[in-house]
Image (spheres, coloured by chain):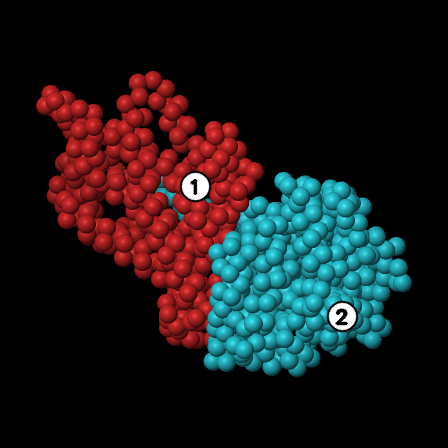
Chain colours: A red, B cyan
């Protein structure tokens, strides 16, 4: 049998006669002088397929087992826990049905007000971080893309916050933002002492959350900028040439042509940052621990506090329930985003 | 083709082996609790400042018995909680744990993770401990009753169980002051009243406008509440009215006139906070005092070791307990020492006899005194008529503030009057809105604190 393999069929692994090809075989036709291979019997092909399937399963088994242990088991455990009262130590869980969910939403005077205040802070973060990240990273990408020299160096410089972001950087930010920190010193040196914060930018309840949002944006811009740069470099240059011929200036080109063409990238940047803003808590835990006076508490941090910082109270179930509510919120946002994308297309 | 198949088989075998080895490694990891007779004992502590002192005690223990004890510090507190939670799940608890007395010991014990020491401690051994703290770590009838209520952190304990023995004792509510700066401001005597304290703050602030303030780790909001305001409030009202502040009776709780009175008095400290105190955790606040950024620090007896470790000259310290107001109900306020941390024995330990020997060894007066000296913390043993000779003049002076149990003695370790789900962090956060944040006044703060505490009572009463 001589197999005729088109590029398309090579991708699908199917010969023109519908036979399944052995992927280990070369897709190129054998030389004309070669003796045709004897056609395998149906039973031999079935046996061969079974053996191959077994090998396939053997190879994916490690990954599947690990996923089953680390993924499905954990997810199932977490879901079950959200219906229980437990402190992480006692051998038995106390099943409470949906009480954890209702307590967090409205039922408990202890937890519901905390969750509501954290939800409001989270909402601000969810709006401000994606919007500001896009507002900074899109123009930055355009400027970088049009830079004639040192583009590589500049790109690396702007990417530094991403590769250095972590606990050490957040602690460094703390020092910069404290009452005797660099920002207050700079403001005083510039004659803008009235803008300095005597209690530090994280010590004033009015400036603490906006300051954290700025730090979050600072660490989110590099990836967003890189995504925009990738998008910009994939655009057809003839579109810009046509726009130039039509007399469109820099501003008009970027707002009327580039921005709409990169709408998909903007969607991804928005969604990624929204997800981080909704579920992230590292920066809040390290820099403020939700303070001062719970003014920067967010839902991600509240989940962590209920799980591990509740003085051994049996609130792991509450933490799990809050985690699931956050997951549902993220899912809803993703679905809404998908719907809007489709409508826009 | 044959070679190809052989390669595939080898790859599959290698994958299976790798997975098997990984799982085996996971299964055997951290199995210290299963130490056999010849294996070292493992001790986990959440206090970094105790690690070195415990290691030195372990060295002495090895010299005497030949048994090795490996000490591992796990900090901060949330890391300790997650690590112990994971270990509890996987059966990898260490042989020994340093725990907060009446904290982790009761929670772990309620879950069956700790050995009941009640019938293991001989009367001779028990006599090593100071009588005032001898029963710490033992489940009392009141504890058992509290464990039966909804949402209790210690559901599962049994009355009479002894789940830890004291390792360190001490108290909260100790003010550390920079002696030189106080002297420069004309203050040579420790303040005896709250008014004197505020006057001292004012005087030092005037001579040191940039670093004359007081600090405390308000990033953990419970510190301001429990270490500073509560001792003062106890002195102002006396034992029963003070404890009533935490009940759900509106005529006596934080929303009452008594509550407003205490909060108004406490609010007088607002102008004297070191800027940014609300953003510092306990260690950072201690460090800022050690570095001279503030002139006063509020902590506990345990703070001294941290200051010493961070290079503060302890001869330059003036220490005194948080004083009561001059017109308060208790003018001769004393602070009761209580067991701050204890040692517990894991029920999963396979070498319980050796672990028990170590606990007893630590309690022996000579070894306890050595531990005290090395850790700059107080051991729960009789340190003699002049403790200064054992633990130095500063810690010795602090012990002078200790008082016997009684109506004029504030015991921060007694929390029996609070609801069992009470979270001092959340109540402290509301207090922070008054001072240092100046967002609410005393009456508003009291109303919010009462509302939150009422919600704990409501949960407890179901």
Q: Left or right: where does residue A274 sit relative to residue B435?
A: left
SS class of the residue under badge 1?
A: helix
Q: Which residue is mark 1?
A: A215
For disc 1, the chain is A
Q: Is residue A310 visible?
A: no
Looking at the rendered structure, which numbered label has been put on residue B249? none
Report the mark closest to the observer, 2 or 1: 1
The answer to whether B440 appears left or right of A71 in the picture is: right
Rendered position, A142 above or below B340 = above
Q: Position of residue B411 (x, y in %)?
A: 70, 69
Where residue B230 appears, as percent x and y from the top left, is 64, 65
Work out how far the residue at label 2 is from the one at label 1, CA to CA, in angstroms.
Answer: 48 Å
> Which residue is rendered at x = 66% and y = 53% of the image?
B73
Q: Dot 2, crowdedness within 10 Å: few (<14), some or many (≥20)?
A: some
Residue assigned mark 2? B133
Determine whether B63 is above or below A93 in the image: above
Residue shown at 70% from the left, 71% from the top? B329
Please state which of residues A151 and B35 is positioned toward the viewer in this rendering.
A151
Residue drawn 82% across the image and 57% down it: B396
Relative to residue A231, is residue B335 drawn left or right? right
**Disc 2: which chain?**
B
């Amino acid at each position: 049998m001589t197999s005729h393999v088109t590029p398309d069929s090579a991708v699908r692994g199917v010969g023109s006669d519908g036979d399944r090809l052995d992927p280990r075989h070369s897709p190129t036709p054998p030389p004309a002088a070669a003796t045709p291979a004897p056609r395998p019997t149906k039973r031999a092909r079935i046996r061969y397929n079974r053996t191959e399937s077994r090998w396939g399963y053997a190879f994916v088994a490690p990954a599947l087992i690990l996923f089953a242990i680390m993924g499905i088991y954990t997810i199932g455990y977490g879901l079950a826990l959200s219906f229980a009262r437990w402190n992480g130590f006692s051998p038995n869980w106390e099943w409470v049905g949906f009480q954890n969910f209702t307590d967090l939403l409205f039922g408990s005077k202890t937890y519901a007000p905390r969750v509501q205040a954290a939800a409001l802070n989270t909402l601000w973060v969810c709006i401000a971080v994606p919007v500001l990240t896009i507002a900074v990273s899109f123009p930055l990408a355009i400027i970088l893309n049009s830079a004639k020299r040192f583009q590589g160096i500049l790109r690396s410089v702007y990417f530094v916050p991403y590769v250095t972001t972590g606990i050490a950087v957040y602690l460094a930010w703390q020092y910069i933002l404290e009452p005797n920190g660099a920002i207050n010193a700079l403001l005083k040196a510039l004659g803008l002492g009235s803008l300095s914060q005597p209690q530090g930018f994280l010590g004033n309840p009015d400036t603490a959350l906006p300051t954290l949002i700025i730090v979050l944006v600072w660490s989110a811009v590099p990836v967003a900028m890189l995504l925009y740069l990738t998008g910009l470099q994939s655009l057809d240059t003839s579109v810009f040439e046509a726009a130039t011929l039509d007399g469109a200036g820099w501003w008009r080109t970027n707002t009327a042509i580039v921005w709409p063409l990169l709408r998909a990238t903007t969607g991804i940047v928005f969604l990624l940052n929204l997800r981080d803003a909704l579920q992230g808590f590292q920066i809040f835990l390290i820099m403020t621990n939700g303070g001062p006076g719970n003014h920067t508490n967010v839902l991600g941090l509240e989940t962590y506090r209920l799980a591990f910082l509740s003085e051994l109270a049996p609130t792991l179930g509450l933490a799990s329930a809050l985690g699931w509510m956050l997951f549902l919120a993220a899912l809803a946002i993703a679905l809404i985003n998908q719907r809007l994308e489709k409508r826009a297309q | 083709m044959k070679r190809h198949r052989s390669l595939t088989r080898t790859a599959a075998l290698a994958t299976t082996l790798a997975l098997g080895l990984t799982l085996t490694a996971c299964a055997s990891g951290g199995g210290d609790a299963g130490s056999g007779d010849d294996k070292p004992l493992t001790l986990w502590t959440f206090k970094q400042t105790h690690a070195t002192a415990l290691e030195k005690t372990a060295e002495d223990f090895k010299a005497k018995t030949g048994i090795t004890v490996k000490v591992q510090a796990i900090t901060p507190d949330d890391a300790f909680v997650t690590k112990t939670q994971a270990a509890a799940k996987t059966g990898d608890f260490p042989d020994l744990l340093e725990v907060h007395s009446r904290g982790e010991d009761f929670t772990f014990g309620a879950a069956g993770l700790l050995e009941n020491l009640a019938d293991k401690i001989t009367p001779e051994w028990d006599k090593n401990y100071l009588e005032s703290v001898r029963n710490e770590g033992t489940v009392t009838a009141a504890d058992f009753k509290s464990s039966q209520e909804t949402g209790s952190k210690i559901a599962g304990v049994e009355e009479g169980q002894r789940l830890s023995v004291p390792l360190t004792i001490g108290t909260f509510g100790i003010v550390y002051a920079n002696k030189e700066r106080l002297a420069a401001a004309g203050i040579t005597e420790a303040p005896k009243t709250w008014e004197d304290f505020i006057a001292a703050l004012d005087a030092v602030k005037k001579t040191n406008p940039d670093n004359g303030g007081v600090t405390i780790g308000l990033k953990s909001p419970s510190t301001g509440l429990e270490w500073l305001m509560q001792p003062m409030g106890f002195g102002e009202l006396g034992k029963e009215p003070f404890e009533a502040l935490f009940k759900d009776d509106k005529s006596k709780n934080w929303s009452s006139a008594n509550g407003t009175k205490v909060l108004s008095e406490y609010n007088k400290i607002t102008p004297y906070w070191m800027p940014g105190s609300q953003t510092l955790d306990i260690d950072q606040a201690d460090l800022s005092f050690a570095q001279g950024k503030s002139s006063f620090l509020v902590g506990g007896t345990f703070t001294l070791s941290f200051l010493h470790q961070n290079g503060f000259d302890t001869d330059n310290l003036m220490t005194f307990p948080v004083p009561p107001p001059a017109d308060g109900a208790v003018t001769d306020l004393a602070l009761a020492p209580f067991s701050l941390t204890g040692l517990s024995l894991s029920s999963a330990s396979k070498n319980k006899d050796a672990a028990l020997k170590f606990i007893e060894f630590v309690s022996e007066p000579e070894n306890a005194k050595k531990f005290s000296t090395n850790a700059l913390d107080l051991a729960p043993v009789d340190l003699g008529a002049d403790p200064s000779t054992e633990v130095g003049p500063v810690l010795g002076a602090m012990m002078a503030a200790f008082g016997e149990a009684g109506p004029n003695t504030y015991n921060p370790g007694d929390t029996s009057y609070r609801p069992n789900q009470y979270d001092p962090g959340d109540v402290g956060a509301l207090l922070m809105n008054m001072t240092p944040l100046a967002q609410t006044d005393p009456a508003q703060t009291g109303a919010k604190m009462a509302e939150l505490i009422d919600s704990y009572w409501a949960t407890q009463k179901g």
